Image: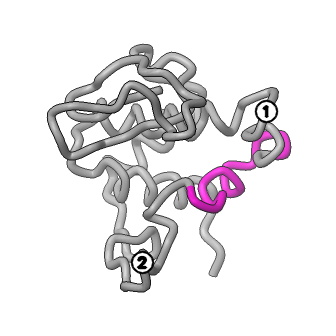
C-alpha cells in the first residue's frame, strides 16, 4: 500500500525528530516543506512542482527512508514508524503552510549527537550554519 504524503510526512517527523519535542519536529517538517516548495536548484528539480514524496525519498537525504545502512538492517525506518496524533498534527500544521520562524528557509538539518557542530553542512560546503534549535543544527 502506498502511503499518502500526509502519512509519509508524519512518519518522517516521528523517525527524524520524534524525541526532539514539538519545535524539533516542526523544524524538520519546515525543512521538508522548504525543499518541496523550492523554486530553483536541486530541490525544485526533485520536487517537480511540490511533490513531497519525491523530497522524502530523494536518495541519500533521510536515513529513515533506508531499510539498511552500511549493510545492516535499520530498525528505525519510515516503514516501522507508528505515528501518533502529535505527528499527524505537526504534519497537518506544515501541510497547511505553517513554518517554524526560527528555521527560515533552511534546507538541511543535522543532529550531530555532540555539543559542537561543523561550520558547513552538507560536508561539500554548500550550506552555512543558520541556527541551533536545541541539539540540532539548521542550514
Percent from the top left, x then y, of residue 49?
84, 40
Q: Is residue 34 above or below residue 82?
A: above
Magenta stretch encompasses residue 59:
yes
Q: Which mark is residue 41?
A: 1
Q: Residue at x 42, y 21 (%)?
A: 129
Tell me where residue 70 sits by quadrant. Answer: bottom left
Q: Is residue 65 above or below residue 41?
A: below
Q: Residue at x 76, y 40 (%)?
A: 42
Crowding at mark 2 (Cα within 10 Å: few <14, some 14-19, many 20+): few
Q: Secondary structure at mark 1?
A: helix
Horizontal arrangement in the rendering, residue 35 relative to residue 32 (left or right)? right
Q: Which residue is mark 2?
A: 70
Q: Secondary structure at mark 2?
A: loop
Magenta stretch encompasses residue 118:
no
Q: Is residue 102 above or below residue 83?
A: above
Residue farthest along the left direction in this orientation:
115
User: How far is disc 1 from disc 2 in space, using C-alphas?
Assistant: 29 Å
Per the rendered image, the range of residues in magenta is 48-60
Mark 1 or 2, which is nearer the eye? 2
Q: Residue at x 38, y 25 (%)?
A: 119
Percent from the top left, x then y, of residue 2?
65, 75
Amino acid at each position: 500500500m502506498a502511503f499518502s504524503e500526509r502519512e509519509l510526512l508524519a512518519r518522517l517527523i516521528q523517525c527524524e525528530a520524534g524525541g526532539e519535542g514539538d519545535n524539533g519536529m516542526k523544524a524538520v517538517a519546515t525543512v521538508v516543506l522548504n525543499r518541496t516548495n523550492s523554486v530553483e536548484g536541486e530541490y525544485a528539480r526533485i520536487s517537480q512542482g511540490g511533490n513531497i514524496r519525491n523530497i522524502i525519498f530523494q536518495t541519500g537525504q533521510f536515513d529513515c527512508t533506508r531499510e539498511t545502512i552500511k549493510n545492516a538492517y535499520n530498525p528505525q525506518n519510515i516503514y516501522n514508524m507508528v505515528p501518533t496524533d502529535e505527528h499527524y498534527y505537526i504534519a497537518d500544521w506544515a501541510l497547511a503552510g505553517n513554518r517554524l520562524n526560527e528555521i527560515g528557509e533552511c534546507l538541511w538539518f543535522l543532529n550531530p549527537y555532540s555539543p559542537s557542530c561543523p561550520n558547513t553542512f552538507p560536508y561539500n560546503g554548500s550550506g552555512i550554519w543558520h541556527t541551533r534549535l536545541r541539539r540540532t543544527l539548521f542550514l
